[in-house]
Image (cartoon, grey):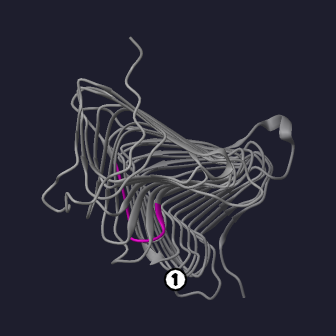
């Protein structure tokens, strides 16, 4: 028999402080189930819910408030927020721990849409979940989530994404740490997710940030004083994967290390778009820094650092795919690049501002109208192997053909054009 704290009455209310609901000993026992229309529950400070099923279910445009609130449950979702107009505010310092399912599910998918979006608000929140496909937060359409400042999401399980969203999400100083196979840190399938300064995303075996689906956007914005970071031990650091998918980044450090297997720092495909301002990308052996394919675009400004493990690795590259327009990569600013630049059926334009240093080689195959154009102002290119490009515009710059690792008897074939006078 199912046992739970059940509130059905319309406009009913529950007020408590330091409440403890413990139904761990029961089979399929939900902690609290608020299913009455416009029910209100104020659980005060320091309340605790423990269960062997869902921790809390709330819907029908009801509201729940609490602070320093704890949910501990197994075999069910920690907190479920259903229906238009339903609202949960967990204040500051709350914690949700689940074993076997998702930490928070929110979906304004049913009821009266005049009641507005479903909402979830918290700051300094900790979500820690275990299990296959056990997501930290699952945000569906018509949902608004505000994670305030210093919230943390941890997942441990295959396909257990940290944040999965079709809605609107905001956070500052957010930490996401996921460890399972194919578990992405933040995956946005629709709507806009905005993550502010001093935020850190780590995926041991999956991608860091990814957008796909219809009108999916991630804004990941650090500051000069509080840079953001992404670590990926899987396929990519940040990726935009459909025609209306966008990833915008500022002041962010990206590291990809897949133990020698292929991994991409930035990856745009299928018409996706990535923009970056003041990025630093570090790629271990087997990695590629910036990669665009299938009619996609990457635009980078301000300081750009790309540090591959050797100059022979791809720092910047496009891929040709039959039936697609050429992908585009544009970069403008002071660049420190250790790695090669390859335009394969793509358009790459590098405008290197004073102080730039590029150590690596170049290739342009001119397939599909592709080109590689480089302009250098008070900059240095240390050429490490045979190279070709379409335009090299030099202003008070140096091209060094004879690096210690290069046999100078090998001629680097470069098409050069000096700036017009």
Query: Which quadrant, please, contains the N terminus?
Result: bottom right
Q: Which residues are magenta?
A: 229-236
Does the stretch in magenta take in 21? no
Image-based side of 193 in relation to 416, left or right: right
Q: Is residue 82 visible?
A: yes
Total numbered badges shown on the rendered structure: 1
Query: Which quadrant, please, contains the C terminus?
Result: top left
Magenta span: helix, strand or loop, mainly?
A: strand
Q: Residue at x 70, y 83 (%)?
A: 2
Q: Residue at x 63, y 58 (%)?
A: 320
Write down the quadrant of residue 81 in the picture: bottom right
Q: Is residue 273 visible?
A: no
Image-based side of 48 in relation to 116, left or right: left
Above or below 71: residue 386:
above
Q: Position of residue 352 (x, y in %)?
A: 34, 31
Q: Position of residue 229 (x, y in %)?
A: 34, 50
Pick the residue in front: 313 or 156: 313
Crowd tier of the residue under label 1, counting other residues whose Cα lies within 10 Å: few below 14, some 14–19, many 20 or above = some
Give the structural element (helix, strand or loop) at label 1: loop
Above or below 95: residue 329:
above
Q: Residue at x 84, y 52 (%)?
A: 110
Does the stretch in magenta take in 233? yes
Image-based side of 74 in relation to 337, left or right: right
Location of mark 1 (residue)? 24
Q: Position of residue 121 (x, y in %)?
A: 53, 44
Outermost left residue: 404
Pick the residue in front: 23 or 408: 408
């Amino acid at each position: 028999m199912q046992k739970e704290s059940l509130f059905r009455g319309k406009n009913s209310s529950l007020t408590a402080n330091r409440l403890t609901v413990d139904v761990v000993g029961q089979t399929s026992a939900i902690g609290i189930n608020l299913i009455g229309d416009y029910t209100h529950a104020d659980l005060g400070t320091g309340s605790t819910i423990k269960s062997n099923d869902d921790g809390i279910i709330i819907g029908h445009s009801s509201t729940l408030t609490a602070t320093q609130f704890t949910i501990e449950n197994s075999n069910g979702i920690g907190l479920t927020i259903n229906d238009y107009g339903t609202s949960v505010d967990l204040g500051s310092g709350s914690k949700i721990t689940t074993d076997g399912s998702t930490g928070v599910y929110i979906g304004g998918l049913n009821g009266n849409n005049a009641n507005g979006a479903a909402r979830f608000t918290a700051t300094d929140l900790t979500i820690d979940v275990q299990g296959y496909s056990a997501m930290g937060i699952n945000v569906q359409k018509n949902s608004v989530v505000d994670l305030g400042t210093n919230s943390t999401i941890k997942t441990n399980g295959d396909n257990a994404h940290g944040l999965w969203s079709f809605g609107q999400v905001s956070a500052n100083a957010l930490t996401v740490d996921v460890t399972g196979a194919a578990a992405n840190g933040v995956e946005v399938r629709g709507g806009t997710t905005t993550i502010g300064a001093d935020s850190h995303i780590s995926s041991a075996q999956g991608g860091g940030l990814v957008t796909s689906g219809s009108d999916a956007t991630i804004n990941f914005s650090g500051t000069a004083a509080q840079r953001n970071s992404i670590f990926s031990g899987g396929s990519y650091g940040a990726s935009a994967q459909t025609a209306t998918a966008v990833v915008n980044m500022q002041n962010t450090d990206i590291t990809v290390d897949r133990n020698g297997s292929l991994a991409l720092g930035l990856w745009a495909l299928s018409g996706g778009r990535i923009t970056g301002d003041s990025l630093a990308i570090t790629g271990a052996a087997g990695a590629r820094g910036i990669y665009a394919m299938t009619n996609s675009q990457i635009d980078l400004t301000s300081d750009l650092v790309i540090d591959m493990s050797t100059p022979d690795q791809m720092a910047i590259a496009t891929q040709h795919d039959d039936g697609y327009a050429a992908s585009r990569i544009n970069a403008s600013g002071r660049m420190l690049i250790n790695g090669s630049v390859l335009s394969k059926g793509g358009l790459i334009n590098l405008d290197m501002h004073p102080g730039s240093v590029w150590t690596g080689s170049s290739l342009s195959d001119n397939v599909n109208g592709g080109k590689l154009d480089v302009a250098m102002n008070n900059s240095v290119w240390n050429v490490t192997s045979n190279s070709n490009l379409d335009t090299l515009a030099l202003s008070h710059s140096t091209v060094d053909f004879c690096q210690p690792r290069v046999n100078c008897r090998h001629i680097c074939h470069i098409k050069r054009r000096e700036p017009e006078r």
